[in-house]
Amino acid sequence: MTKISGIRASDVLDLSSSFVPGVELDLVEQTTQCWTSETFDRSCLNIELDSQVRAELVAALSLLRARPLPVLLEDKGRHALQETHSFLTSIRSLLDVGPGIAVVNGINTDGCSLDEIKSLFWLIGNAFDRVVATKWDGTMIYDVRDTRRPAGYGVRGSTTNRELSFHTDNAFGTLLPKRVGLYCIRQAEKGGASRVCSLNTVFNHMLEHHGKLLERLFEPMFYDRQAEHAASAPKVMRVAMFDFEQGQLAARLTPNLVRNGYELLGLEMDSVLSEALDMLEQVLAIDNFSVQFSLKSDQMQFINNLNMAHSREAFSDLDDHDSQRHLLRTWYRSTAGRAYDG
């Protein structure tokens, strides 16, 4: 790591070794992954299962209920899921070369236990892609629900009911999941709608109107790691927010965790980065740069986590724990090991 006054190398996990200064940025090609609300194809937010896929999943659910296994031991090999696998291959295509998101209407799980729903989503996830840990402790299926814990160090926003600004998952981690899946068990009583935004569109706008500020986002900065690491590991990471991987934009989008990173180190953020983060948030808030929707029970959402940002509005819920908003989340990545850090 470049020596910074007052900062020990052991205080920071430095992932910026691949940074090359002075690289000229070009506009991202206008494709289906570079959209506004006027050009976005909303049909990807309401995808039905065909009869063969539905029949396979109903049969799988029946089998895992009749002959249960622990969730993570449920093996797609004991189920006939050929049509499901083909269907999910088309969903991956929507994420990789299409609009970057797909919302699928799943099968009815009324009367199923939480473990049965998790087992079903685990099967679907393993047919979709390679599932990897969502937390340092090895959690593979993450419960997205309000724990009523106050916001603070190490408390992920996904465990609260507060508004979540535009972000990509695990921006503060050593490895980025390429794709993210959600399964909606229950909606909130009020609020909780989602928004998605093409970061290719945001990139092009920033390059055309705020080029110097965008360049700063391709340079290293400090991130709060959200306590997702060993107790003895650095609390802060140094890496760029934007990069290109195999010609595709890849983002670590969490402006507030960058601000927190500098606070944890007791450093004053440079004025260019401060202005760049503020401008980025203003561009993300441009109304026609995003689309809004709400996930309903038994719907699944799959999203490209490298160049699509997502947000969630605040919500309020019932006091009964078993009636509150509850989603399951999985991450997918083909590189490195399946542990959180590979």
Image (cartoon, rainbow, N blue to C red):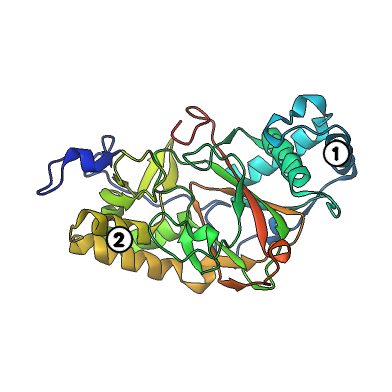
Q: Amino acid at mark 2?
A: Arg
Q: Secondary structure at mark 2?
A: helix
Q: x, y percentage for residue 124? A: 73, 39
The disc at residue 65 is 1
State left or right for residue 221 relative to residue 72.
Answer: left
Q: Secondary structure at mark 1?
A: helix
Q: Which residue is mark 2?
A: 259
Residue 86 in the image: above or below residue 251: above
Looking at marks 2 and 1 on the same chain, the residue that comes earlier in the sequence is marked by 1
Q: x, y percentage for residue 108? A: 85, 53
Q: Amino acid at mark 1?
A: Arg
Q: Specify the farthest residue to the left.
A: 5
Residue name at image x 73 percent, y 65 percent: 323
Q: x, y percentage for residue 195? A: 57, 65
Cα separation, mark 2 vs mark 1, equals 47 Å
Residue name at image x 83 percent, y 49 percent: 112
The disc at residue 295 is none
Residue 193 found in image quarter = bottom right
Residue name at image x 67 percent, y 33 percent: 72
